[in-house]
Each structure stands twice: as structure tokens, then as C-alpha cells.
């Protein structure tokens, strides 16, 4: 990104993507997600099979930062509650909102060709048929962010919004396993072998965490630790 004011870009993006809570505190949920996806996209762009296609790395990074900015736009327009961000599938309309905000905020900071590629990457990232390498990279990075332990925080926010607890997270995980959801996602969501392999490793780490969560939620670990295997089930057990 030589010759481009990286700090100014990050400052603008942070202002666009950081929202305020009712108390006036910063809600970093969307900002952290965007930074993770941007860093993943930056790394994916350097994979040999991807780098050979000469992606504009600045366009990749900027598009990844703003790929979900449509959520911030909708929130500021009071179309959704702040806690609803990222809890439902992104639409083409949301991608358009994101592109408009990106152009408004960064047009003065980017070369015209880079800006145009970044805008196209944001608008096309949901299009599986798109051949724009920058859009492919952003989509790959976004899909990767749905694998592993970090997405558990999204599940927790969804539970808080719906008034549900730990058991709802576990039940959702079990249903996805039963219907081979993750196997299908691994097969369909990734274009590049390296990202698919990393997603698989992240999925393994998530499975281990969910097994531990299930054990602790049910109290099986304390029963085993205290050798109370003959103890009756807890009176509040409503699973």
C-alpha cells in the first residue's frame, strides 16, 4: 500500500463502523469483524495462486474493511437495532449501501482505479459467478470469519437479543451438525485450498469448545470430578 495513507483510511473506517451504545460507549462488534476480515483478505491475497492474478491489495483491504458497512448505515438510519447487526444474511442492497459509504469516505484517499476496484469488490462479493479477484478474496475472507471460536460471540449476541441462553447455542450447534451444515459450508464456501484447510482446523477447535461447553452446561464434568455418578439429576434440568 505504498503511497497511500493507511492510517487515514483506518481512521475513516473506524469512524464509519464504530457505533454507540445507549450509554454512549463504543460498540466495537462490527469494527472488530471488519478488521478480522480485512486482515484475512490481506493474507489471502498473498497466496501464490491468488497473487498470480495480480489483485490490487489496497482495494482488497479497503473493500474488506467496508464489506459489511451497510449494517452501520441501516443502524444509523434506525432501520435495525444495533444488536441486530450481522445476525442475518447480507443482501445486495446492503452491499450497495456499503459501497456508497466507502466511496463517500475514501474517494479522496485512494487512486481512482483502486477505488473503482474496491467498490466493485464490495458490490460483487455475494455473486459466486463474479470473476473479479478482489471480490473473490473478500468473499473468501468473510466466509472464513464464520468458522472457529470467534463466531461464538455472534451467537451470544443473538441469544441476548432473543432472551436465550447457553442451551440455545448448544442446540443450534447440534442441529447444524445433524444436517451436515458445516460439511456443506466447507465444500461450497471456499475457492482456495489453503483457506478451506484453515476453516477445517477452525471448525475442529470450535467442536472441541462446544463439547466442553456442553459438558459444563450439563454438569457432567462436576459429577465426574466429585465422583457423584449416582447422584440424581438437578431439579432445574429442563433440557
Image (spheres, grey):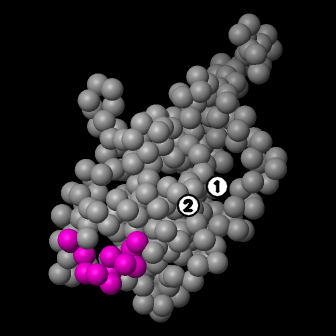
Residue for badge 1: 204
Q: Earlier in the sequence, mark 1 or mark 2?
A: 2
How many C-alpha atoms fall within 10 Å of the one at disc 2: few (<14), some, or many (≥20)? some
Most foreground residue, 120 or 32 = 120
Q: CA distance from mark 1 to mark 2?
A: 31 Å
Taking the image as shown, residue 74 lies to the left or right of residue 195, namely: left
Residue for badge 2: 92
Quarter of the image that includes the C terminus: top right
Give the SS element for disc 1: helix
Evaluate whether residue 137 shows in this view.
no
- The stretch of residues the image draws in magenta is 108-119
Q: Which secondary structure type mostly characterizes the magenta part of the structure?
A: helix
Q: Quadrant of residue 129?
A: bottom right
Rendered view: 45 above or below 66 = below
> x and y percent of residue 169 in the render?
64, 35
Q: Is residue 118 magenta?
A: yes
Quarter of the image that includes the N terminus: bottom left
How many C-alpha atoms fall within 10 Å of the one at disc 1: few (<14), some, or many (≥20)? some
Depth check, mark 1 against mark 2: the one in front is 2
Most foreground residue, 172 or 122 = 122
Taking the image as shown, residue 72 lies to the left or right of residue 2, namely: right
Which residue does the image show at 36% across and 70% down from the upper left? 61
> x and y percent of residue 11 in the render?
21, 57
Amino acid at each position: 500500500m505504498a503511497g497511500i495513507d493507511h492510517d487515514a483510511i483506518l481512521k475513516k473506517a473506524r469512524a464509519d463502523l464504530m457505533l454507540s451504545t445507549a450509554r454512549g460507549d463504543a460498540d466495537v462488534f462490527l469494527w472488530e469483524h471488519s478488521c478480522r476480515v480485512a486482515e484475512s483478505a490481506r493474507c489471502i491475497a498473498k497466496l501464490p495462486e491468488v497473487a498470480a492474478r495480480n489483485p490490487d491489495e489496497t482495494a482488497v483491504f479497503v473493500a474488506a474493511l467496508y464489506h459489511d458497512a451497510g449494517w452501520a448505515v441501516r443502524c444509523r438510519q434506525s432501520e435495525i437495532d444495533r444488536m441486530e447487526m450481522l445476525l442475518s444474511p447480507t443482501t445486495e442492497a446492503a452491499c450497495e449501501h456499503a459501497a456508497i459509504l466507502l466511496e463517500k469516505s475514501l474517494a479522496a484517499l485512494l487512486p481512482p482505479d483502486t477505488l473503482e476496484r474496491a467498490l466493485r469488490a464490495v458490490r460483487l462479493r455475494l455473486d459466486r459467478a463474479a470473476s473479479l479477484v478482489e471480490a473473490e478474496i473478500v468473499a473468501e475472507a468473510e466466509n472464513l470469519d464464520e468458522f472457529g471460536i470467534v463466531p461464538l460471540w455472534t451467537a451470544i449476541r443473538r441469544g441476548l437479543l432473543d432472551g436465550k441462553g447457553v442451551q440455545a447455542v448448544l442446540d443450534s450447534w447440534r442441529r447444524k451438525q445433524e444436517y451436515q451444515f458445516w460439511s456443506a459450508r466447507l465444500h461450497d464456501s471456499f475457492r482456495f485450498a489453503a483457506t478451506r484447510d484453515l476453516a477445517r482446523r477452525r471448525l475442529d477447535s470450535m467442536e472441541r469448545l462446544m463439547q466442553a461447553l456442553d459438558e459444563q452446561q450439563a454438569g457432567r464434568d462436576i459429577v465426574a470430578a466429585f465422583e457423584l455418578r449416582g447422584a440424581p439429576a438437578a431439579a432445574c434440568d429442563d433440557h
